[in-house]
Image (cartoon, rainbow, N blue to C red):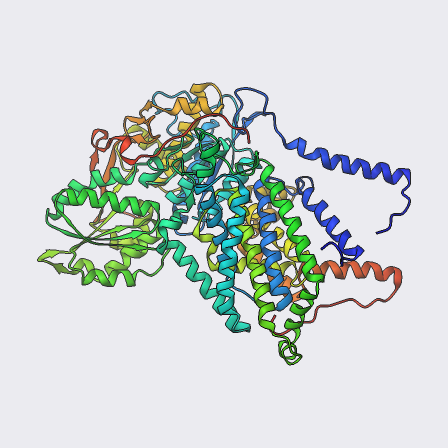
Amino acid sequence: MFKGLSRNDWLLLAGFSAFVLLMPIILQPIGAAYPALMQKICIFGIFAIGFNILFGLTGYLSFGHAAFLGVGSYAAVWSFKLFTMNIIPALLMALVFTTIFAVAIGYISLRRSGIYFSILTLAFAQMCYNLAYSVLTPLTNGETGLQLTLKDPRWIDAMFHEPGAGLPRATLFGIDTSGGGLGGFYLCAIALIVCFFFSVRIFRSPFGMMLRAIKSNQTRMRYTGFNTRPYLLAAFVISGAYAGLAGGLMAATDPLAGAERMQWTASGEVVLMTILGGVGTLVGPVIGAGVIKYFENIFSSFGDNTLHGVFGFLPDIIEQPLVSFLSLFVGEGWNLTLGVVFMLIVIFLPGGIMEGLRRIWSRLNRRHDGGEKIAVAQPQPAE
Amino acid sequence: MSFKVIDRRVFLRNTAILGAGLAAPMHFVRGAYAEDVSCNMPKGDTVTFGWSVPLTGPYADEGADELKAFQLAVKHLNGEGDGGMIPTMKPGALKGNGVLGKKVAQVHGDSQTKTDAARDNSKRMIERDGAIMISGGSSSAEAVAVQSLCQDMGVIHMSGLTHSNDTTGKDKKRYGFRHFFNAYQSGVALGPVIGEAYGKDRKAYHLTADYTWGWTQEESMKAATEAMGWQTVAAVRTPLGSADFSQYITPVLNSGADVLILNHYGKDMVNSLTQSVQFGLRDKEVNGKKFEIVVPLFSELMAQGAGDAVKGIYGTSNWDWKLDDEATKAFTKSFGQEYGAPPSQAAHTCYVQALLYADACERAGTFFAPAVIKALEGFEFDGLGNGSTLYRAEDHQCMKSCLVVRGKETPKDKYDLMEIVKVVPREVTTYDPSIFGGELGPSDAKQC
């Protein structure tokens, strides 16, 4: 499984791993180097990588991926409640349950393509959300969210040792992954690197080539004698399993599962992440996830005071209107900033942040080589 | 892969980078050696409090008012302004020079009325900003989620607006404290009053917000009303944050019920109450009696939102700015001077919680969380607007009087929308802490 990757791929993987593992240092200057946010960035990075395997390679836009995230979370929390606080069984449970879900939903939804596929997945996800929110309350605890309690049986743990006085933390053989600290972050970081590696493998494999062929012309594929549906279903299930793993990790770093992470806004968020970063690129979705999570957590905490601090050097006449204008875009208005950024990127850089980076790169190179054509993503219908 | 010959300089540089990278995690492993150190004990000359309040979502109005109250509390703790309720608090250890000589700093985040967002916020404030105490929240789901997070991280959580029995019942935590009253106390206070006003043979129909607060509110109201002979026709759950309640209100008309109990709060209550009135429920006669609507948990902010619809409607309240005691007057005056409007009950409970935490630190003489918890447990105080109050050690619930209120028929202005019908004394609202189960858990200090 380690063959077939070029030297560049290995360099990319090494660079990516180094960046992810050194996030506690790299993100320090922008105030994002605290475990909870870095965990979120890694987890949503995994989610977006998985989504990109489906959307980026096959062009099938699923609008219901948050359902898998939620199923993964609930499965993991139930494993904590019933069996053990070790995260390995929890993550396995999350993977198994989401795979089953993905096979079922994918089998039905993939009978249609384009907008009909999107609507079908959206409908399934909303159905799951409503089930979790109200119908299955005994299983999900509804809006309040499923939590650990002191009364949980935890059969496997109970066999080996007496339960402690307080609520136990999720662990990986003695290393705490929940309850703060960098343990949880390194778990997520390593999971992200492994997931990234698999995604590179898929992109470079003949299987990945098939998926790309489906995106460019499914009819021609059929005429040449390929049955495309098994490939699509495989891509859908893989991408669902990625989402399930992300959901399981969310529970492993914070053992609580709420229905709102299955809502359609959460499904929309991963679409935004992927498009913002760059559809069909390897690193793009992770960058998109990082940017959105950073905005959500850091921009939403800025208030007028922060702005006055930044623009304090300006004379009052300019500062006052500037701050009152900009304060629309921070704090509870962070969604507005995100919207503006998203619009700018979609209009001027249809290939996402990755296309921007590529343009800068080729401009730098052109200065040396003189006249290499800039690669520009062509807008494609049905994307 | 091929390797070029690396020269000494490059080798040295790369080794240095690699070394720094490997050593970096050590930097974050904080001192687990010292005793009497809990999460985020302040080191410099400031101590940071974190406010997690909803600025968007169905409880946004309450959240905005809570944030104002917190900012006012920080001012008063630092000795700015007129001191508000600090002088009236008895016994009070606060001197108006910060807490234990350290200036109080504050950070806040928007919890969006969602549990995931509330926990994200609180984690940011604890891990990045070094908050030693988290307070706020306008929803019981948030309070329950954040207080269990705080228990896990070893940071004290002073709940703001949370009225579910679970917060200090089934889901109570050693690190979580609640000043606000709960659904059970509402039921006990409101039951006799509406029984007297509407008679003993009524048929009630519940519409309930579908989460922990709504569930316990419905249960407590059922218990209180059925005890005096009412029947419950149906109890229907509605999703939190609905804008249109018509599909839930239409069945009420044909159900044979003659009282509608709205277990809603915030914008939900504003919508469901105005829509019920628009549907003509209050003009109807059922079973030969006038149809009535009851809103068990009421607030000034909601009354402003619902306008004329609140006139004559019974409910309960934790506190009201029109109360006639020194503490209430002092707080209302300084809040009014600062923001030009009287404080809501949400603002009051958050202000009081901030003061109570600061006072407990002063009395304990340290910020060490287990010592502060000890100082709060069983603390008997007065002069914070609710008369003599006990922070009960068994479940961290405040035992105090609460109010039965009614929407005023002829309000003087937009802040004078509710009249106090009855002040229900502490003896009546006190209950046995064991009826809800749950365990507080240990108070051992944690590093974070």
User: Residue A349 location, x and y as percent?
Assistant: 68, 64
Q: Is residue B279 above or below residue B156?
A: below
* Lateral position of residue A91 relative to residue B334, left or right: right
User: Residue A244 location, x and y as percent?
Assistant: 53, 53
- On the question of residue B173 being in view, the answer is yes
| Residue at figure coordinates x 67%, y 60% from the top left | A202
Report the quarter where the N terminus of chain A lies: bottom right
User: Residue A45 location, x and y as percent?
Assistant: 61, 52
User: Which residue occupies the foreground of this view, A30 or A328?
Assistant: A30
User: Which residue occupies the foreground of this view, A54 or B358?
Assistant: A54
User: Which residue occupies the foreground of this view, B132 or B374?
Assistant: B374
User: Which residue occupies the foreground of this view, A245 or A338?
Assistant: A245
> Furthest residue to the bottom?
A223
| Residue at figure coordinates x 60%, y 73% from the top left | A228
- On the question of residue A341 being in view, the answer is no
User: Residue A169 location, x and y as percent?
Assistant: 50, 36
Q: Is residue B95 above or below residue A284?
A: above
Q: Is residue B190 above or below residue B93?
A: below
Query: Looking at the rendering, which quadrant does residue A343 occupy?
Result: bottom right
* Lateral position of residue A211 relative to residue B176, left or right: right
* Lateral position of residue A341 relative to residue B94, left or right: right
Query: Looking at the rendering, which quadrant does residue B221 occupy?
Result: top left
Q: Is residue A303 above or below residue B285?
A: above
